[in-house]
Image (cartoon, rainbow, N blue to C red):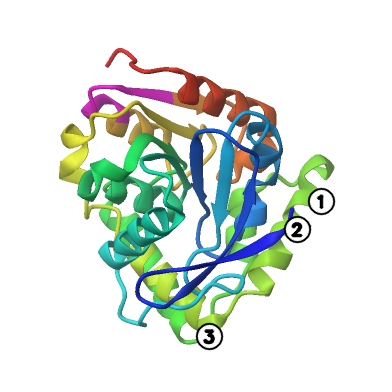
Amino acid sequence: MTLKTLQLSDGRKVVLRDEGAGPGVLLIHGVGMCADAWGPQMADLARDFRVIAVNMPGHAGSDLLAPSARLPDFVRWGAMVIEALGLGPVSVAGHSMGALIAVGLAVERPDLVARLAVLNGVHRRTVEARAAVEARASEIANGKGDIIQPLSRWFEADAAQQALRAQVAQWLGNMDQAGYAAAYRAFAEGDDVYADEWGKISCPTLVLTGDGDLNSTAEMTRTMASAAPKAKAVVIQGHRHMVNLTAPKRVTQALKEWLDFKEVSA
């Protein structure tokens, strides 16, 4: 996949991968990842769609936002990306932090979002979970955030997932420190920013997670889906946070069905 650069209206540049032809699908990764994290889905979906996987601000060559940026700032950035692409409304899928951005886009700029997919998204963390993620955000801001902790949560210890774990470790290890810290702080504080707005999301919506994801839980997934009129919850058994990599065929199939439907029952 060839990297391209997109210029936004505020002068910032975004590095992305752009493959295929047809209706537009925008993919937004999570904190510390990059556009390549969507590789399995991009390869398949690009047969029928124009698939654009962006690198978030401060990730893999995309320009930073301000250190004080919070989730609404990332949502405004996402809107500028869609406007700069000039494709009209697109289907937006996000993973983890990318899922929070995607939800914000569907709420704030429904004119730009034809469909919404929320993969391993967070929604109203418990007090304990919020304290833990905010503590990690502070560690990362101080240059002390290790990568072993998230990798241990995201992957099983079996040999089948070790190559994926090594690849994700490489992406995390290559992160720009300032970009990582800013995005993680926005992620840590973003789980309730749009939590009361799900009823406003009227486009066809997929909400998906793995049943072993302890932070983006199945309960969160079902709660989000139940609050939107055209949403479907999918919980993939036996997988954790990086489910699009560990269960690529099942996630891609769920995305294909999402891209195909116009309405689903609540």
Mark 2 and 1 residues: CB-CB less than 8 Å, in contact? yes
Q: Secondary structure at mark 3?
A: loop
Residue where numbered disc 1 is placed: 163
Distance from Cα at disc 1 to Cα at disc 3: 26 Å
Q: List the single residue furthest toward the bottom.
A: 142
Secondary structure beneath disc 2?
helix
Q: 240 or 93: nearer the eye? A: 93
Against 49, is 93 above or below?
A: below
Q: Quadrant of residue 137?
A: bottom left
Question: Depth-wise, is mark 2 or mark 3 nearer the camera?
Answer: 2
Q: Looking at the image, can residue 158 be seen?
A: yes
Position of 168 with respect to 88 (left or right) is right
* Residue at the (37%, 71%) spot, across then down: 185
Decide which of tag 1 and tag 3 comes sooner along the chain.
3
Q: Is residue 259 above or below residue 147?
A: above
Q: Position of residue 213 (x, y in %)?
A: 51, 41
Report the residue marked by disc 3: 143
Tell me, for residue 167, which label it has, or none: 2
In the displayed image of the protein, which residue is found farthest to the front?
86
- Report if residue 125 is visible in the image: no
Q: Position of residue 216 (x, y in %)?
A: 43, 44
- In the rendered image, which quarter is residue 68 located in? bottom left
Residue type highlighted by circle 3: Gly
Which quadrant is the C terminus positioned in? top left
**Dot 3 surroundings within 10 Å: few (below 14), some, or many (20 or more)?**
few
